[in-house]
Image: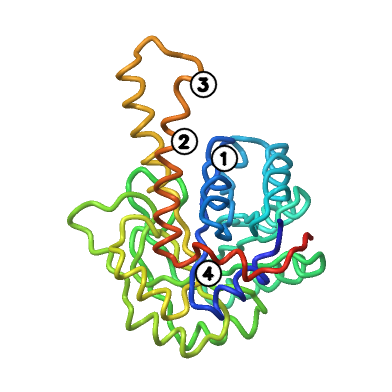
Amino acid sequence: MLMNMKDLLLVAYENKFAVGSFNVANSEFVKVVVSAAEEQKSPAILQIHPNEINLVTDEFVAYVREAASKSKVPFVIHLDHGATIDDITRSIRNGYTSVMMDASHLPFEENMALTKKAVELAHMVGVSVEGELGTIGSNEGSSEGGADEILYTNPDEAAIFVETTGIDTLAVAVGTSHGLYPETKDHSIKIDRLMKIHEKVNIPLVLHGGSDNPDEEIRQAVEHGIAKINLSTDMKRAFYNQLRATLDENPNAYEPDILMPEATKAAIELVKKKMDLFGSTGKASLYKLGEI
């Protein structure tokens, strides 16, 4: 079933689990997330970055909506890191049920103004909005963007930002980055800062760059307000590592029904483990049936 993010994450926030938000840039990844969610009886979020929608085109969203709507577990279709109002309106027209307005690179007041405009547009049609305060880091290999240096979220500013914009969820910068971390880079989640933000803000918080962090840090983050965890790199790495292995074993293979099944299976197993870690496994039963 298809929901908006506000309704999906309210249940997660109140019951102290997090919902995985997985980047789906092709039909194989849609299959991975839907299959894993149905096996685990878990809610899940299918998210598409502007770079990815440019790759797969607008028509792809109809396929994603069909897959999510037919499922018996709750799904959201979410715009990941929309940077402009055009990104927001394009996504709403395409049938997303949630959008992210990421103006975190702008000064505080400009970020608030642009995010508030996105909220006004999206809320008119029942679409929820994620904002971002502070900057998420970026590692080599990621095409999702981010900053060279992390600007941590200020708890007091977070309270003002949420109140002023009317956002439904807030992405916070607490030490994580997109992509694969080099061994020399500190990517620990700053739990003390997260706790302070959680004290000031009473809406679900979002962790970007959720790949590659120790399990215990993820569990602590969920205890302190994180209700959505973005995950792209780990899932894609599981898929493509297995695909490379299959190609090595079958160098002359070219048919998708030979190449894809084992890669898809590897990614499904990874996503299932993440759902266990996030605490969302078995939580689909907490949601009422419905569709927007």
Left or right: 227, with 91 as reference point: left
Give the left or right position of residue 251, taking residue 44 as reference: left
Residue at (46, 14) in percent of width and height: 254
User: For the residues marked 4 and 3, what is the alpha-carbon distance in whole angstroms?
Assistant: 40 Å
Q: Quadrant of the N terminus?
A: bottom right
Q: CA distance from mark 2 to mark 3?
A: 11 Å
Q: Which mark is residue 278?
A: none
Front disc: 1 or 4: 1
Q: Earlier in the sequence, mark 1 or mark 2?
A: 1
Q: Which circle marks residue 264 in the picture?
A: 2
- Please give the name of the residue rendered at 62% of the width and 42% of the height, measured from the top-left corner: 53
In this figure, what is the number of numbered marks? 4
Q: Quadrant of residue 42?
A: bottom right
Where disc 3 sits, the SS reads: helix
Q: Amino acid at mark 1?
A: Lys
The label on residue 257 is 3
Marks 1/4: CA distance?
A: 29 Å
Q: Characterize the local packing of mark 4: few (<14), some (14-19) or many (20 or more) Cα atoms within 10 angstroms.
A: many
Disc number for residue 31: 1
